[in-house]
Image (cartoon, rainbow, N blue to C red):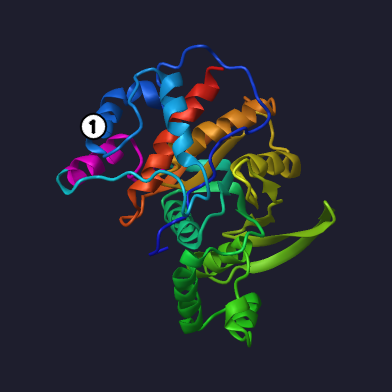
Amino acid sequence: MASISAPAELPINIQPELSAPSEQPGSFFETHKEQLEEYFTLVKNAPKWSDDLGTFVENTQKTLAGDHSAAGWKPEVPPEGEDRVKDIYRELGLIDEITPAPGNYDYILVFGAVQVGSNSRLALFKEMWGRGVTADQIVLFGGPRKPFSVEAEDIAEDLEIAKSRDEQSPWMKSVLHDQNPDARIESEREGMRLAMERQLGPLVLKRIGLRLENERLLGNHEFSFHDKPLTLFDATTVRRPQGDARPTTASCVAEFLEEFEPDEDAQVLCYVAQPHAERMRKTITRILNGHKRRDIDVVIGASAGQKNLGHTHYWREIVANAYEDQQAIQ
């Protein structure tokens, strides 16, 4: 997206709940207290600062109320504080790319996102594959969520790039010859398919597996990528506490466990995008633990944060990371 990305879902009330140790010395909140307190002094009208995790979460959770694209408190940074605030985001681990160590993993998971996020994750996946980060099975998640208005420019750019190429998949040809341009890409899943075409080229479709779930026909498309199976997974929609309905990190992880039944001690590399990397790591780990799969080793790879992301996106990650810390010790 050259446009602003919609943030990933907040980890509120994710099930199943699980017990966790009472101490978390390496937690986001404990590690970054000094930077967080400085951030609160720089941002205008910030919620009341507290160096106690429980109070911090209580003071800040209410700022996230409402639709994530419009409502809720928005950080206001004075011009003289802009440079330092950006440095703080970097120190909090919310900006820089995270590259996984070379090796062959059992699975690579790429979670769906707004169009620019899907593109950046797949671009990093392709780059790292070329640098020796491979897997026996690749799974890309996409759901039925309709594209946000801010994705229109990025979808149009992907379509133009696809149109300019000599080689196109049958699916891409059908999209480009659709007589109704506004209906070309109707879901996040189709957006991921379009990002696949842009970043990975016209992959060979091997099989379409259909299943009926909640009276909805779902179809997982299986491709071949460097002779390895790549599945475009049709993720199930769930209703989130915020009120909207779409696949979540938790639901995608649960469906991955059910569909693929990973072996004991499986190594799973998950590609996400900044500024969501740390929270996604904790969320995925917590969900696996809740499904009694503590044996699975989770590694995170993350594309760098967009240069034009607003302060609200980073604020939401700060609040959500603190919330995850609290959940881990309850």
82 in magenta: yes
Q: Which of 318/58 is in front? A: 58
Tell me what residue is drawn at x 50 percent, y 67 percent. 149
Tell me what residue is drawn at x 37 percent, y 46 percent. 74
214 relative to 96 in the view: left or right: right
Evaluate whether residue 265 shows in this view: no
Tell me what residue is drawn at x 74 percent, y 44 percent. 259
Horizontal and vertical percent for residue 51? 34, 19
Residue 24, quarter of picture? top left
Magenta region: which residues? 81-101
Q: Which of 193/318 is in front? A: 318
Residue under circle 1? 41
Horizontal and vertical percent for residue 174? 65, 81
Q: Residue furthest left?
A: 80
Q: Is residue 275 above or below residue 112?
A: above
Which quadrant of the figure contains the C terminus?
top right
19 relative to 210 in the view: left or right: left
Which quadrant of the figure contains the N terminus?
bottom left
